[in-house]
Image (spheres, rainbow, N blue to C red):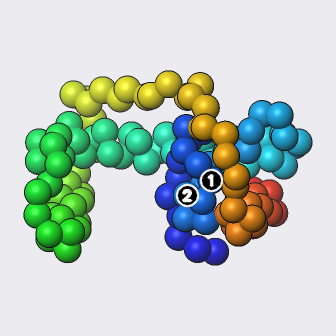
Amino acid sequence: MPHVIIADEAYPLMKHLLKPYRKQELNADKEYFNKRLSRARRTVECAFGILRSKWQILDKPILTHPGHADNIIKAICILHNVIIDKEGIEHNLKETQFVFQNENRQAPAGRVNNEAKVVRDNFKAYLCNNP
């Protein structure tokens, strides 16, 4: 399975960008996939919300070389985990608020790459066969 970015309906389906199936094409397996994908996306959004609330550098673009930005993000994650180990998760969460974006946005109509459909179908098959 390839590494992918989890997206919502507002984004186009691409081989590296995984989005839910449209409501018009749902069957039981696709609906299950959509629920699992949505849960994973919300988990990631919460994690980024926690990091953003604690690390102000993430409130604006990081104006540096991409490799340096990657190292900054990794350092923030490591430091954040050290703080959780020292102070506990409850201390870290009590001041954090999560705001979810509107989930009813629709992607613009367009052609979808067949390779992207295959990647999504493979993830669906994996999730349905490994609940």
Residue 115, compared with residue 27, is above or below; it is below
Considering depth in this image, is 97 or 19 the residue closer to the camera?
19
Q: Please identify the quarter of the rendering in which residue 56 is found.
A: top left
Residue type, numbered disc 1: Leu
Residue 15 occupies quadrant: bottom right
Q: In the picture provided, is 79 more to the left or to the right than 35?
A: left
Residue 86 in sight in this render? no
Q: Give x and y (percent) for residue 33.
A: 73, 49
Quarter of the image for residue 103 reads top right
Mark 2 surroundings: few (<14), some (14-19) or many (≥20) residues within 10 A:
some
Q: Label 1 neighbourhood size at 10 Å, few (<14), some (14-19), many (20+)?
A: many
Q: For residue 29, which numbered disc appears in the image?
A: none
Residue at the front extreme? Answer: 110
Q: Position of residue 97 (x, y in %)?
A: 30, 26
Distance between the Cα atoms at labels 2 and 1?
Answer: 6 Å
Who's the residue at 64% across and 74% down the image?
1
The answer to whether one can see residue 62 in this image is yes
Camera-side residue of 54 and 102: 102
Q: Nearer the viewer, residue 48 or 111?
A: 111
- Quarter of the C terminus within the rendering: bottom right
11 sits left or right of 34 in the view: left
Dots 2, 1 in contact, CB < 8 A: yes
Q: In this image, 15 relative to 70: left or right?
A: right
Up-down: is 44 above or below 123? above
Disc 1 target residue: 13
Tag 2 secondary structure: strand
Q: Position of residue 83 (x, y in %)?
A: 16, 53
Where 3 falls versus 80 (above or below)?
below
